[in-house]
């Protein structure tokens, strides 16, 4: 049984109740919120391990709620979207969602996604706690979870840090999207592989790196990505 705390946010009461029921049956401690404003207040009060967050809600929608959560937390977030369009997914992932599930979905599938996300360890990079990685003016301090660019601190999300550490730890090695998913997101990740592209784009933006003339993170077309050695 798993006692970790999950916050379910959806304006549809029936969906909240079904998801909550299945998660509680698996031993999770589950709380509910009906909209973004209620979710933000509940998050501060409960400090959940994972948030299941609907995109389309009245008032503060799911994307804006996620943006506000990311200002203060790297909590795991699974987005729910009723739309078939790519935009909801891409925007959600770019803001910092860990995974997304499209409605209608099976409750058992969602529970499986929850378990898969929670099995991922933040900062689970292939380096010893004492490792400090140096890469052309970039310093990745694994023990402190800090990145410095030409002496200045760079603010990264947890996933961006893990992605950078995975690449920088093996400069020159080309990683496929699947390899990066297994290394950073976890071997049992079942979402869209394009989540890697979104986070690489965000990582480059944070570093001030140019995709057309990369200093640190290069694209290997048709294969994946590598750290420039």
Image (cartoon, rainbow, N blue to C red):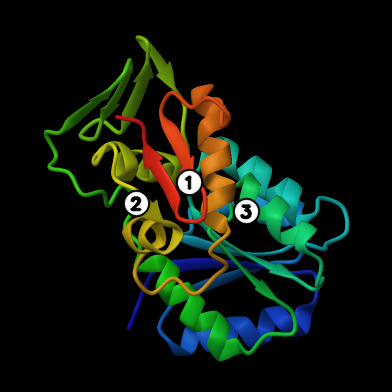
Q: Which residue is mark 1?
A: 74
Q: Name which residue lies at 57% across and 67% down.
A: 192
- Whole-angstrom CA distance, mark 3 to mark 1, is 13 Å
- Label 1 secondary element: loop
Q: Are the residues flagged by discs 1 and 2 in contact, CB closer than 8 Å?
A: yes
Quadrant of the snapshot with the N terminus: bottom left
Near mark 1 (Cα within 10 A), the count class, few <14, some 14-19 or many ≥20, is some
- Label 3 secondary element: helix
Q: Name which residue lies at 45% across and 58% down.
A: 177
Q: Determine if residue 41 is in view.
A: no
Q: Which residue is mark 2?
A: 122
180 sits left or right of 170 in the view: right
- Whole-angstrom CA distance, mark 2 to mark 3, is 17 Å
> From the viewer's perspective, is residue 59 above or below residue 22?
above
Q: Which is nearer the N-term, disc 2 or disc 3?
A: 3
- Depth check, front residue: 171 or 55: 171
Near mark 2 (Cα within 10 A), the count class, few <14, some 14-19 or many ≥20, is some
- Residue 131, image x and y in percent? 15, 33
């Amino acid at each position: 049984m798993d006692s970790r705390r999950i916050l379910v946010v959806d304006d549809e009461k029936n969906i909240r109740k079904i998801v909550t029921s299945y998660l509680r049956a698996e031993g999770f401690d589950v709380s509910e919120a009906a909209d973004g404003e209620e979710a933000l207040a509940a998050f501060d009060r409960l400090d959940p391990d994972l948030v299941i967050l609907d995109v389309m809600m009245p008032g503060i929608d799911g994307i804006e709620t996620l943006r506000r959560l990311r200002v203060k937390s790297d909590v795991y977030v699974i987005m729910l979207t009723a739309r078939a369009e790519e935009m909801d997914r891409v925007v959600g992932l770019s803001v910092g969602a860990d995974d997304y599930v499209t409605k209608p979905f099976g409750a058992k599938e969602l529970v499986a996604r929850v378990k898969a996300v929670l099995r991922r360890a933040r900062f689970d990079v292939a380096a010893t706690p004492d490792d400090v990685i140096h890469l052309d003016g970039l310093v990745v301090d694994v023990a402190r979870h800090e990145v410095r660019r030409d002496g200045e601190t760079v603010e990264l999300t947890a996933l961006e840090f893990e992605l950078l550490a995975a690449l920088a730890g093996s400069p020159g090695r080309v990683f496929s999207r699947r390899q990066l998913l297994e290394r950073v997101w976890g071997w049992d990740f079942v979402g869209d592989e394009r989540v890697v592209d979104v986070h690489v784009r965000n990582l480059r933006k944070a570093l001030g790196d140019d995709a057309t003339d990369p200093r640190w993170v290069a694209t290997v077309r048709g294969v994946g990505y590598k750290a420039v050695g």
